[in-house]
Amino acid sequence: MGFYVLSYLCIMVFIGATGYLIYRQINLPLHVRWEIYPVQHEITARTAYGGSYMEKVNWWNDKYENSRINELKYMVPEILFLRGLWKENRSLWWFSFPLHFGLYLMIATFALLLLHACFTLGGFSVGVVSFLLSGLIVAAGWSGLILGSIGSLGMFYRRLTDRSLKDYSSFSDYFNIIFIGLFFISALATCLSGDSFLEGAKAYTFGLLTAGSSRNLYVPGQNVAGFLTIVSASLLVAYIPLTHMSHMFMKYFLYHNVKWDDVPNRRGGQMEAAIKNNLELKPTWQAKHINADGHKSWRDIASSAPKEMK
């Protein structure tokens, strides 16, 4: 039962930390507009050359339109296949891609395990659906573990040997790679040591849904590899939202609320109110020419004459 308690606590930490990150992001002051194009949710006719709806004469009189399809056409290859890294640093992509895609496949595997457990609870533990789910669990699980193991070992090696990465790698960067690698390698060892169909993962997930009830005959952590898999997986769930690795889901806000934010600022709208609120903030920048002493607001600074530099 101790393993299940650990998993429950880690899931609670994940939910709480993720909720706090999203709450904090939503309540941050309005960002400074980037005004960098192309914006991927523009209509197809303009994304072809990186244009903007602001090109049109009197654009403010027209209805604001965007394309979620064009947005997804950009985001899916970028998130799943690291298209940007493939273009800019292909040698690093060969290790970074399997690491990230391995994590994505583990998330997919866990979702399939939960679905399989729900079907089992509903009395559908046998049949075509259960058979298909079991096949998908094995395919996604093995693929994710192999890719993740290769990626984590490869990225650790690159950080140790590549001067361009080594000079900018902190202790936490090495720790994160080792932590993730521990999960992948221990889980892969568990499967190789006699659980090729991930029956242990199915039983443990079922136990999570039933709080380790007597219906679940599986006893977790029966060997060292299984013990390490459960502990490392649980702790990793709690650890990710507490570190910069939360970028895997928080970058949604970077793209939509910062990089691609081209919502028009209309009189009397929410954006105008947010801008007015920003103008009342009192900065404490050290740059002397700004004269931000913590007492003057941005409104005062922006409306005053520039301070002469000597």
Image: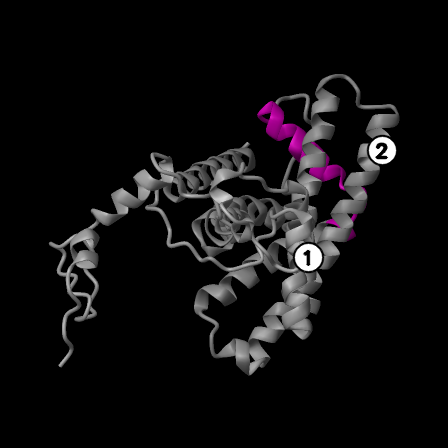
For the N terminus, the quadrant is: top right
Label 2 sits on residue: 132
> Mark 1 or mark 2, which is nearer to you?
1
Q: Nearer the viewer, residue 227 or 115?
A: 115
Q: Secondary structure at mark 1?
A: loop
Callout 1 crowding tier (Cα within 10 Å): few <14, some 14–19, many ≥20: few
Figure quadrant of residue 267: top left
- Colour scheme in use: one colour
Residue 6 percent coordinates (x, y) = 50, 38
Point 70% across, 57% down: residue: 81
Q: Is residue 197 shown in magenta? A: yes
Q: Secondary structure at mark 2?
A: helix
For the C terminus, the quadrant is: bottom left
Point 63% across, 71% down: residue: 88
Image: magenta residue range: 191-212
Residue 38 percent coordinates (x, y) = 58, 57
Q: Nearer the viewer, residue 192 or 87?
A: 87
Q: Is residue 162 shown in magenta? A: no
- State the residue lying farthest toward the top: 123
Sequence order check, earlier mark of 1 and 2: 1
**Helix, strand or loop for the magenta stretch, by majority:** helix
Q: What amino acid is at disc 1?
A: Ala
Residue 223 visible at all: no
Residue 122 percent coordinates (x, y) = 73, 17
Q: Nearer the viewer, residue 217 or 27?
A: 27
CA separation in Å, label 1 and label 2: 41 Å
Q: What amino acid is at disc 2?
A: Leu
Query: Which of the labelled discs sits on residue 306, or is there none?
Result: none
Query: Which of the labelled discs sits on residue 48, or is there none?
Result: 1
